[in-house]
Image (cartoon, helix red, strand yellow):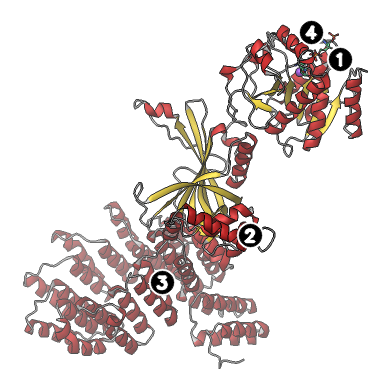
Amino acid sequence: MESSESIISYLSQQEAGEIDELLMGPVGFSLDQLMELAGLSVASAIAEVYRSNEYNRVLVICGPGNNGGDGLVAARHLHHFGYKSCICYPKQTSKPIYARLVTQLESMSVPFLSIENLPKELSNFDILVDAIFGFSFKGNPWPPFDDLIRKLVSLKDHYQEHPKSPVVVSVDTPSGWHVEDGDTSGEGIKPDMLVSLTAPKLCAKKFCGPHHFLGGRFVPLSIMQKYKLQLPPYPGTCMCVRIGKAPISPKFHEKTMESDPFVQFQKWHDNAVEAGVKEPNTMALSTATKDGKPYSDSSSRMVSLKKVDQGGFVWCSNYGSRKGREISENPHASLLFYWNALNRQVRVEGFVQKVSEEESEEYFCSRPREIQVAPAVSKQSTVVLGREVLIQQCKELEEKYPQGSMMIPKPKDWGGYRLIPETIEFWQGDESSVQMRLRYYSQVIDGRKEWRILIIFIASIEWLMQPSKKLIRNPLLHPHSAPSPPPPPDPTTITNLILQSDNPNSLTQSLHTFTQWTPDLVQTILKRLWNHAPKALQFFQILYGHPTYTHSPTSFDHAIDIAARIRDYKSLWTLVARMRSQKLGPTPKTFAIITERYVSSGKADKAVKVFLSMHEHGCQQDLNSFNSFLDVLCKSKRVEMAYKLFKIFRGRFKADVISYNIIANGFCLKKQTPRALEILKEMVERGLEPTLTTYNILLKGYFRAGQVKEGWEFFLQMKKRNIEIDVVSYTTVIHGLGVLGEVVRARKVFDEMIGAGVLPSVATYNAFIQVLCKKDCVENAIIVFDEMLRKGYVPNVTTYIVVIRGLCHVGKMDMAIEYMNQMGDDCEPNIQTYNVVVRYYCDDGEIEKALEVFEKMSGGTCLPNLDTYNILINAMFVRKKSDDLVVAGKLLIEMVDRGFLPRKFTLNRVLNGLVLTGNQGFAQEILRLQSKCGRIPRHFRL
Ligand SMILES: NC(=O)C1=CN([C@@H]2O[C@H](COP(=O)(O)OP(=O)(O)OC[C@H]3O[C@@H](n4cnc5c(N)ncnc54)[C@H](OP(=O)(O)O)[C@@H]3O)[C@@H](O)[C@H]2O)[C@@H](O)CC1
Ligand SMILES: [K+]
């Protein structure tokens, strides 16, 4: 509604009276005609600002003159508009016009309340219409109107603090005000809305409430010209027109904002409708191509909002249009609403999904027929042979589906889109120099999508134009808010959400709603879920279907590793195939993982086959992958097999020092130092120089084989041959000597190395501390631990495990727990740490405490692994209590659920234990459950 205060004329009391006389004289109006139109204007203006669903109860206070008559008419129209009208009309006149108005109202059962019957608190009403005095008022109000006016004044004073007090609407003039000078005492009523009739009176200049309207659309041109009246034009068929800018009400304040952005949006949308914004549903939709480069590959256009629901913002379009194509490539999009009259903007960002076919059908059917024709004939963004062709097609379609016959079918590529928002930002311009933007962003907390609010204060645009003034970005904490910027999703929360969810659909929805996924975050969560393989794979699978996120090769490797660990080979190879189809791999690392898992599950032959068939999966074998595979075999003590392969393929892959080192190490791990030495000889013969690593491998081999003398001798030889001995060599010797009981010599080497210019590493400290714990005393170990700290070393998880184990070993459990609690954020206890504590508690018979630690793990960031379950289940037999065996049974179920295979022995033990302690029912349940998931051999029967 366009209008402006600058073009408005104001009438003196005298002019108002003169015009009144003219209207009812030469112009030919009757009083009741004018009053009818005036009252209708008042009701229309009220309905435009205060919707009947929010402001329903209206009290119209009518004075003794025509102003009161306007009030009676307005009350009738408001009643028809859906408001609950009540009238207070203390000085009724017997003139027929008024009597008729009263009769009309009475016949509609609109109640008339005497002053005595008025509720004490007028606050029972939502709207109070002041139709007491109009332009003929003079002097001070007489009783009983003085009291009524005072009531209106005090009501405002009383309710100033309250968020929703009744609003006061004055008809033509605020009653009690001087018609020209206004509220001279400053103590008169302060209406929220003034509906000036015919033209505003001079006192209206002093009106400073939020809504000033003009009504009385009956002034003829002759009067306009005679009095040089400048009045805003009435738009369309409206009975009233706003004077001046629509205020933004309620004031944009974070405290008045809803916690749900959809509710907030609805409110603002309603306000836009109320304020008469043209096409409040029109929004700019911006989409982008896959790479989404701004300016070049993004595009915007206006579309019409179809509906808003808790899922998102819906509109309809041709799926083949440019926006449709861009959305199919890149579902990220944004919507922008701008409601000019309110100076408000809402920005919505998120990702777009097509609505279901049924929903689209529904939208199409709900369209008027004329609008159905257009999408049915037009293929958007395609070149048409000419306007005539389109018109002809429309005609043909209309002939084919004549009005009232069959419905026009929905075109196949026409339908709805829904933008699921990630952020919704509300902005409102106001006159102050600092403006506020309120951004809602979604987070998934405990499985539920929750909205957080971020408040951004920003200097006004004018300020920004001046380079000297700084942009203020000052996030405030709000009851619903979190600090800026929106924090990255918290892995713990997401992990717990996944662990606790037993509804895959809602989990999928939550995880898909979330669009801030990064490979790092995904990997962190996969690691957290490492010991709950089924959940980890479910998570991976859900994100595989995410509309915008694509897994990284590393995440694929993690998932493959997990699938392989639980021997779900079908999933494993599906993942490999997907990785390949997405051109993300499989990489040599993927195969290193797969072969290692096959080997560790006793399928070394299969591992060899996999290695030899790598190229069939698009990953060529090379020296590196060959070495990795040899290493896998050697570390699982299959050095003979490795050596055989090595001899077959060393020519093809051009075996290098690393290949030889791996085989030598394989022999050392099997305590076969002479064979390792042979390998060393062989490599030299083949012209390959041994490296320091080669020597270190042999050095370690000697100590591992318990050959202290040979080991020491070898170490001396290394020195003698001027081999640059490094920290690994020293650490090997310290550890080797210590473990074999030579603590004093170990300490000597430890002290010596610094003199030799080699600084100990954390690994050296770890080795030395371990030696002291095992072969000396834990107190000395702690002295070294403290020394390590003093020297500025940062202990790692291994350091802590070594100390904790040492403490547990001598029964200092409390101290061990203290050390565990000391482990900070950078060095959180891992599963081995927990297992040490659980194991020692169990060994000490402190089953409850062990279970306590276990509980903590399950609810925290470190899930129990196979060892944890085995330790605990075994401990449940110690006390020979029936309850303990039930716990063991539950643990068994849980471990299987999490993808761990119990050993046959453990399974039998638990089942037999349950039967022996009278828990047959539970035993049977376990069997049923487990054989259902195929984890337990079917032949096992009770
Ligand atoms: N184009 C137009 O002009 C149109 C005008 N219209 C409407 O008519 C309104 C003007 O109506 P109006 O002339 O009847 O006078 P209004 O202000 O209602 O009240 C006067 C009454 O109050 C009384 N009164 C006076 N002072 C008082 C006091 N201190 N304390 C107590 N009482 C006092 C006075 O008593 P009296 O002086 O007669 O004894 C009389 O009874 C105008 O504002 C608009 O709303 C529309 O309907 C149609 C088009
Ligand atoms: K009034």
Identify the residue position indicated by label 3 in the image: 559
User: How far apart, in angstroms, are the residues tagged by discs 2 and 4?
Assistant: 63 Å
User: How far apart, in angstroms, are the residues tagged by discs 3 and 1?
Assistant: 84 Å
The x and y percentages for residue 346 are 52, 41
Beta carbon of the mark 4 residue lies under 8 A of ligand 1: yes
Q: Quadrant of residue 107?
A: top right
Label 3 vs label 1, nearer the camera: 1
Q: Quadrant of the C terminus?
A: bottom right
User: How far apart, in angstroms, are the residues tagged by discs 3 and 2?
Assistant: 41 Å
Pick whichever, 242 or 536, lies toward us. Answer: 242
**Total labels drawn:** 4
Pick whichever, 379 or 874, lies toward us. Answer: 379
Q: Amino acid at mark 4?
A: Asn
User: How far apart, in angstroms, are the residues tagged by discs 1 and 2?
Assistant: 59 Å
User: How far apart, in angstroms, are the residues tagged by discs 1 and 4?
Assistant: 12 Å
Label disc, if present, on residue 362 of the rendered structure: 2
Pick whichever, 190 or 573, lies toward us. Answer: 190
Identify the residue position indicated by label 4 in the image: 140
Asked if residue 159 lies left or right of residue 788, the reply is right
Q: Amino acid at mark 3?
A: Ala
Asked if residue 173 lies left or right of residue 259, the reply is right
- Closer to the N terminus: mark 3 or mark 4? 4
**Tag 1: Cα neighbours inside 10 Å, few (<14), some, or many (≥20)?**
few
Label 1 vs label 2, nearer the camera: 2
* Circles 3 and 2 in contact, beta carbons < 8 Å: no
- Closer to the N terminus: mark 3 or mark 2? 2
Q: Is residue 115 visible?
A: no
**What secondary structure is found at the residue carrying circle 3?**
helix
Asked if residue 141 lies left or right of residue 529, the reply is right
**Tag 4: Cα neighbours inside 10 Å, few (<14), some, or many (≥20)?**
few
Q: Amino acid at mark 2?
A: Glu
